[in-house]
């Protein structure tokens, strides 16, 4: 494919962080440091890595990271009590509960315990509803990252036949709503979808969010399609067979260094916005 565009997530993430620097400095002049509280339940190595990456990203940008590591046998009630405590803490501006939690915990109840104004990861039911109606401030971070990349590279969404493969409540469903709100024509596919290959083959834009390595094949892709791979699987591979698909794509995200870095940058952006809003509401100053 001639004039192929690799959508560089690191470049987009750095651009977001550069724009945040002056806003963080302005908060600092008021004696405020945006603070993200990350909650990790149990000892899952992958989750520990993700939490550490988010903490390091906060530190590099000048945000505070409050790490809360809880035992795997904690009850849903005790986890929710901890979340409510963080909701009341005026020094904490954003709360992230690392997914997944141990199976005995009611994850949805725990997510929905996060105060809407501190739901910087976009995981609450109310947050999803606001996203769908274009009222929310904090959409889920990976969908927000996908839209941010589309805007950065000036990719046209209006009227485009867009296929989202995946329907998770923090990725597939919200990104479909966000794309629809931008006038894309959206089809949502999933594990029960029949003739998936045929549906994908008609797409101008494909968003892969199914959580299966190399699930989207090159011969499924229409010539000139845009491919956004939001998957991340063992072995540092995405949901798209990158080597096969890039031959036909006009633009494609790599894995790693595609959507992932932008997702973390959007989490930082949401935390800064939350700090600005909460500070303004608390003491009435202009940020």
Image: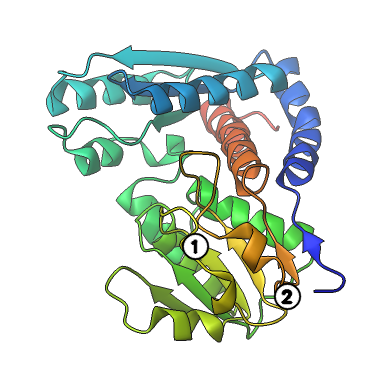
Residue 195 visible to an observer of this rendering: yes
The quarter of the picture where residue 253 lies is: bottom right
* Residue 182 can be seen, yes or no: no
Q: Is residue 265 left or right of residue 25?
A: left
The percent position of residue 42, horizontal first and vertical second, equals: 27, 19
Where, by quadrant of the figure, is residue 241 drawn? bottom right
- Name the residue: 52% across, 27% down: 282
Q: What's the CA distance linking mark 1 and mark 2?
A: 16 Å
The picture places residue 165, in percent across and down from the top left corner, at 44, 68
Q: Which residue is mark 2?
A: 156
Could you tell me residue 198's position as x and y percent? 46, 86
Choose between 181 and 236: the one closer to the eye.
236
Q: What residue is at 33 percent from the left and 23 percent from the top?
A: 44
Where is 259 relative to 99, above or below? Answer: below
In the image, 274 versus 8, the foreground residue is: 8
- State whether residue 232 is above or below residue 224: above
Would you identify the image quadrant in which residue 277 lies? top right
Numbered mark located on residue 175 in the image: 1
Which badge, 1 or 2, comes first in the chain's sequence? 2
- Secondary structure under the numbered disc 2 in the rendered image: loop
Residue 105: percent from the left, percent from the top?
16, 32
Q: Where the N terminus falls, by quadrant?
A: bottom right
- Quarter occupied by the C terminus: top right
């Amino acid at each position: 494919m001639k004039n192929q565009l690799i959508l560089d997530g690191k470049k987009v993430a750095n651009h977001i962080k550069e724009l945040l620097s002056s806003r963080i400095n302005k908060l600092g002049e008021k004696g405020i440091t945006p603070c993200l509280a990350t909650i990790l339940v149990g000892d899952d190595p992958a989750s520990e890595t993700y939490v550490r990456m988010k903490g390091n990203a906060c530190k590099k940008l000048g945000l505070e990271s409050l790490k809360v590591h809880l035992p795997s046998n904690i009850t849903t009630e005790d986890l929710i009590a901890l979340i409510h405590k963080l909701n009341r803490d005026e020094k904490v501006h954003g709360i992230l509960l690392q997914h997944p939690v141990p199976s005995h915990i009611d994850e949805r109840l725990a997510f929905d315990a996060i105060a809407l104004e501190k739901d910087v990861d976009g995981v609450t039911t109310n947050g999803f509803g606001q996203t769908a109606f274009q009222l929310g401030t904090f959409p889920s971070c990976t969908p927000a990252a996908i839209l941010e990349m589309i805007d950065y590279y000036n990719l046209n969404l209006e009227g485009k036949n867009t296929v989202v493969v995946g329907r998770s409540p923090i990725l597939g469903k919200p990104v479909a709503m966000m794309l629809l709100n931008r006038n894309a024509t959206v089809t949502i596919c999933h594990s029960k979808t029949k003739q998936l290959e045929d549906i994908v083959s008609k797409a101008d834009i494909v968003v892969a969010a199914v959580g299966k390595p190399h699930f989207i094949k090159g011969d499924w892709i229409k010539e000139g399609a845009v491919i956004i791979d939001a998957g991340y699987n063992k072995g540092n591979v995405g949901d798209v067979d990158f080597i096969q698909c890039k031959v036909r794509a006009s633009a494609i995200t790599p894995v790693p260094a595609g959507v992932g870095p932008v997702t973390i940058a959007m989490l930082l952006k949401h935390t800064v916005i939350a700090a600005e809003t909460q500070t303004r509401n608390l003491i009435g100053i202009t940020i």
